[in-house]
Amino acid sequence: MPRQITAFSNPLVKRIRGLRDKRHRREEGLFLAEGLRILTEAREAGILPQFVFYAADSAQHPLVVALVEATEAHGGEAIETDADILSKLSGKDNPGSVVGVYAEFLTPLDSLDRTRADLWLVAERLRDPGNLGTILRTADAVGAGGLILIEECVDPFSVEAVRASMGALFTVPIARAAWGEFLPWLRSGPGQLVALSLDTEVDYQAARYAAPTFLLTGNEAQGLPAAYAAECDLRVKMPMLGKADSLNAAVATAVMAYEVLNQRR
Amino acid sequence: MPRQITAFSNPLVKRIRGLRDKRHRREEGLFLAEGLRILTEAREAGILPQFVFYAADSAQHPLVVALVEATEAHGGEAIETDADILSKLSGKDNPGSVVGVYAEFLTPLDSLDRTRADLWLVAERLRDPGNLGTILRTADAVGAGGLILIEECVDPFSVEAVRASMGALFTVPIARAAWGEFLPWLRSGPGQLVALSLDTEVDYQAARYAAPTFLLTGNEAQGLPAAYAAECDLRVKMPMLGKADSLNAAVATAVMAYEVLNQRR
């Protein structure tokens, strides 16, 4: 029988609410996800929360019932609460009917099986959590094997990144590596490293991509360091007809990823 | 000689800071933009602020000098201030060296010249300011004629949308219209209306796009109403290999826009 919590001062509510802060996430090894669609996607991927908070008036919803049952069967705890507490936990005025608390999980670089997919996404010093979540969502859509985060990137377990990923955080493997670890790993097996660049004459549609392709996107403001771009097997550019000569990092990644996908179907 | 403001309590500071709130923007008809790159892009597009605040320690920067001179020559006011005030105005810890206050400007639908470009972007009930700004940035990159906002969309003059647009707000014409105004206007001249849809078998790369193409993107959560999709000349789908069957709205718009562009070059 799920316990009920309706007091803001409840210690568990305070603790969970603290997970919106990166330092607390690191200490606890836990993160927050919200919304029935995303938590259901996680459940279907076999990932269950340590805690699931649900609104009492949603307790009969078949997907909430399935989530609560699976969470309890998996050793987690289901907690019946109300919209105010859910709002406090998620930081949103309109929190949806469920908030889940999950153990953080990264995939060690050495555990990635590059033969599992023909396309992999790599992001270097990505700073915006919305961009990171959006790139995860794109990775899911194009069937990428995973996302590799290079150097100091924004936390993929931040509330904003999880939200923007729309559940892809649970289905797309994420690894973290310094450039000095990533490059030797990449060169230890097959893999074409491709950078989007402004300093090249190679059009992204004229290039031919070899599987597995590793698409490398640089920092939003500064792009990729020249030394990293020089290590790539291919540098390509996209046509830019406007005044700004720039695209959002998640957009550029997606346009490139669809080009690679399109060449193969 | 620019006046100097360093007091938080200054009435102009309070008034300008209020522009982060939509209601105040509507009352004043003004909005905020920040950062030397974006304000310079606006200046180069011939758009100058009513007020420009700049950090005293950036006063000698050639682009700041050019901005201050152009603003004053255009009847606006330049105000020397410090990082704390700039931070207070922009709401950012790291505000950059300039904040500008501009008059809002929308282009009436009837003033859009559809012969000016082969591609136009149309967004319906877009809710996320980051998506709106990102779509503006993409519109600039693909040389779109403008962005038409259908029904109730997020405010393009919000601080977040302006920031995400990276200056494209100043270079891409924006019109607003109800669907019931847009459709008769579209049908009064040449124009192929194309919707991205999940309910079609037409692949977005197999379709052929006729100029001018109007690419229609629906609401982030609900997509396009079926009745609107039915009015389109073409409904196309993109391959989705993942578990979620969805892409971020700004990403989907960009992948589509680059396909239209690629077919023409």
Image (cartoon, coloured by chain):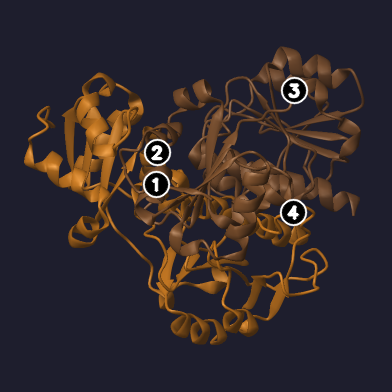
Chain colours: A orange, B brown
Q: Secondary structure at mark 3?
A: loop
Disc 1: CA contacts within 10 A as few (<14), some (14-19) or many (>=20): some
Tell me the mark number nearer the camera, choosing from 1 and 3. Answer: 1
N-term-proximal mark, 3 vs 2: 2
Would you say the residues marked 1 and 4 are in contact, meaning their CB atoms lie under 8 Å apart? no
**Mark 1 on the same chain as mark 3:** yes
- The residue pinned by badge 1 equals B5
Inspect the image, locate mark 2, and give the three-letter code of the amino acid beneath it. Val
**Mark 3 on the same chain as mark 2:** yes
Tell me the mark number nearer the camera, choosing from 1 and 4. Answer: 1
- The residue pinned by badge 3 equals B108
Specify whether B23 is left or right of B68: left
In space, the residues marked 1 and 4 are separated at their CA atoms by 33 Å
Q: Position of residue A45 (x, y in %)?
A: 40, 49
Q: Is residue B191 visible?
A: yes
Q: Is residue B212 above or below residue B138?
A: above
Quarter occupied by residue A8: top left
In space, the residues marked 3 and 4 are separated at their CA atoms by 23 Å
Q: Position of residue A237 (x, y in %)?
A: 74, 67
N-term-proximal mark, 1 vs 2: 1
In space, the residues marked 1 and 2 are separated at their CA atoms by 8 Å
Query: Which chain letter goes with mark 4?
Result: A
Tell me the mark number nearer the camera, choosing from 1 and 2. Answer: 1
Q: Residue at x 72, y 40 (%)?
A: B172
- The residue pinned by badge 4 equals A243
Specify whether A241 is left or right of B249: right
- The residue pinned by badge 2 equals B13
In space, the residues marked 3 and 2 are separated at their CA atoms by 31 Å
Q: Is residue B101 above or below residue A205?
A: above
Query: Which chain letter goes with mark 1?
Result: B
Inspect the image, locate mark 1, and give the three-letter code of the amino acid beneath it. Ile
